[in-house]
Image (spheres, helix red, strand yellow):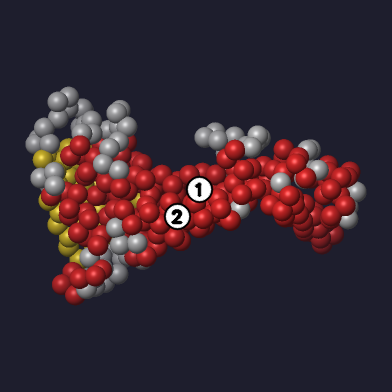
Amino acid sequence: MATEDRRARERAARRRLIVDTARQIAEAEGWDAVTTRRLSTEIEYSQPVLYKHFSGMDQVAAAVAIDGFGELARRLRTVPAEAETPDEALTRIARGYLDFARDNPAVYDAMFTGRTTLRFAEPDTPPELVTAFTELRQAVSAVANEADADMTLAAGVRQIQQDVEARYGVPVEAVTVGDCELDDSLNALIAAAREATVNAAKWSGASVISLFAEVEPGEVSIVVRDRGKGFDPETVPADRKGLAESVRGRMTRRGGTVTVTSAPGEGTKVTLKMPHTPSQPRPSTPSRT
């Protein structure tokens, strides 16, 4: 067993050396300079050793791309950490994305512009790709006031759940009672609920977040609740109310309301309500995800 473990570590180390060396050559001289002969010379292993790890240069480039997606995801996750509003977060995300492309042109080429063996939006898509695109979608969705034409309330709630769980690793228990098509007002409701859920994931310290949406006659409501550390709304400094004002602004512009209930040690409950008269009401069968 000890011998097998040692061999596995040595194999992993050789693979890492190949990928890192290919990246260094590509960044310095371009991908045309990355050949099996060149890699063999640089890492001081024979070409047959290279082929034990990669069948060709396309696979090497794909491995570099996967590393790049992982790095991009980590950068995008940390960039908006101090942003007070979704608009500011999106700006920081865009800058972080462009900075990454500028600082790593060969890696960016392998990720987005070169021929690749990677499969996107498939069951076997590497998790680094999924996470990176989730970060981008999260930032854009947080400021968007529009949704897909066929998006419904239940689908919007599920998207919040999936995005927040993927980005922050905090479980979100989502329940939807009833469903309806999204219009401009309900797009604003979904955007506000996303902000509130992200805020809970980032700052509450709760182990799980509850997301409850309900379609009632003349009104649609979403309640975001956590049982985290809570806070005293009266003691929040004026310069730290960016998110609360952003959520409230989204809702009030469309005639909605926001109620925040919180206390230290008792968690936080954000209740969002939006007037709505659906043109084609859907069955009110509860869905839980």
Disc number placed over residue 132 in the picture, else none: 1
Q: Residues within 10 Å of mark 2 (few under 14, many from 20)?
A: some
- Residue 205 x, y percent position in the rendering: 36, 66
Considering only vertical position in the picture, is 221 above or below 6? Answer: above
Among all residues in the image, which is located at the extreme front? 29
Tell how many labels.
Answer: 2
**Residue flagged by tag 2: what amino acid is it?**
Arg
Q: Is residue 18 left or right of residue 102?
A: right
Quarter containing the C terminus: top left
Q: Between residue 244 and residue 231, name the one nearer to us.
A: 244
Question: Does label 1 or label 2 sit earlier along the sequence?
Answer: 2
- Residue 36 x, y percent position in the rendering: 83, 43
Secondary structure at badge 2 equals helix
Residue at 79%, 38% (x, y): give it: 55
Residue at 52%, 35% (x, y): give it: 121
**Residue flagged by tag 1: what amino acid is it?**
Ala
Query: Residue under circle 2?
Result: 95
Secondary structure at badge 1 equals helix
Q: Is residue 185 left or right of residue 17?
A: left
Q: Between residue 219 and residue 51, name the one nearer to us.
A: 51
Q: Between residue 239 and residue 191, name the one nearer to us.
A: 239
**Quadrant of the image occupied by residue 7:** bottom right
- Residue 136 visible? The answer is yes
- Residue 232 visible? The answer is no
Q: Residues within 10 Å of mark 1 (few under 14, many from 20)?
A: many
Residue at 13%, 49% (x, y): give it: 252
**Quadrant of the image occupied by residue 117:** top right
Considering only vertical position in the picture, is 226 above or below 32? Answer: below
In space, the residues marked 1 and 2 are separated at their CA atoms by: 15 Å
